[in-house]
Amino acid sequence: MIASPSADPNLRRLPVHRISRILSTALAVGALVCAPAHAEGIVGTGFPAGFPVIEDTSLAKPVIGFGAAGPVTRVPVIFLHGNNDTPFPTACNPFGRVQAFAQYLAERGYAASELWALGYQGDQCNLAADQTNRSRIAHTVAANVPDLSRFVAAVLAYTGAREVDIVAHSLGVPLAREWMRQEHAYHQVRRFVAVDGPNHGIINCSPNPLNYFQAPAAGGFTPASEVCKELGSPDTPFLKRLNRGDDTPGPTRVLVIRNADKSFVYFPVQDGAIAPVPAEDSFGRPTPFSHSASLQGAAELNLLGQGAFDPVLGSSHMGILNSPQTWDATFDFLSARPHR
């Protein structure tokens, strides 16, 4: 069970240049992070027969993801990956750890028909031709809300469920929040696990010359890039609108799982192979982003040393998605009986 922050002190909030080369190395060793196949209850890499084809609004091609036919007795879970990621390993992205996360739930009683994922940025093969696609419009929250809206509606219709649970990592967190905000869809989401999401911005967008993420080869995260217009500061119009009032409105129960020591999108410290950048926002103002993943009104689990679970880059931001602690806490939170 996950206790509330007030009940358990462990849940209280705790106080590249060579990016292209790193990513190339990751591609070469990507097989190291692929989960083994399981004989029964396997989580696949596609959608079942009869599930509607959903066109990616930005890419003009069908979304990728997974799901399965079969009876549904639990609330279906929808997984959302982060920026520049995929629901499962692809030819161009060796990470794709959402599939392994879902497989963990399958091995603890979930049916494959209850486990779904939306790949809202395609297979990431377009990054090879232009690394700045990482920060362009197709990778923003706003561009992908329509995909999520249609996907949730399709999962509900296909499974016959009345609500879903959402497990999101990184960019997937504000994507889920913005969809719920735009469509007042809080009644459709029973529980929401928000893993290291940029709820209050990212550190990678400042105009400081030491912010190497601005370089085209490192993603082109300049203050003028579309992703940075959304997430470059707690004071962007997008984040001010998203965070106005209650961070956790409606009946949805929320668990935040965050890195409390390092995470290259929030902390100005070395995170595995990822060198730090100054703690400044997209307006060039000194800004602490270390608590960006936090949400008022949510239970919060703070984790340390999560880089141990990223065998390619050693980064905590990616490792936390592959962490046994994250998987255990998520299963407990989704399985817990509602309070009377």
Image (cartoon, helix red, strand yellow):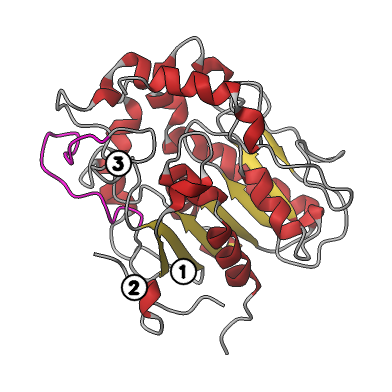
Q: Depth check: give the residue in front, 35 or 166.
A: 35
Q: Earlier in the sequence, mark 1 or mark 3?
A: 3
Q: Depth check: give the residue in front, 69 or 38.
A: 38
Q: Please, what is the three-letter code of the amino acid marked with disc 3? A: Ile
Outermost residue toward the left? 285
Q: Please, what is the three-letter code of the amino acid marked with disc 2? A: Arg
Q: Which residue is mark 1?
A: 250
Disc 1 to disc 2, C-alpha distance = 23 Å
Q: Which residues are magenta?
A: 276-293
Q: Are marks 3 and 2 in contact (CB under 8 Å)?
A: no
In the picture, the disc for residue 202 is 3
- Is 33 colored magenta in this rendering? no
Outermost residue toward the bottom? 340
Taking 303 as reference, is 212 left or right? left
Task: Please identify, in this view, whether the residue under mark 1 or under mark 3 is nearer the observer.
Answer: 3
Point out residue 91 in the picture as x, y percentages from the top left corner: 66, 21
180 shown above or below 81: below
Q: Depth check: give the residue in front, 120 or 273.
A: 273
In the picture, the disc for residue 129 is none
Give the image quarter of residue 96: top right
Q: Earlier in the sequence, mark 1 or mark 2?
A: 2
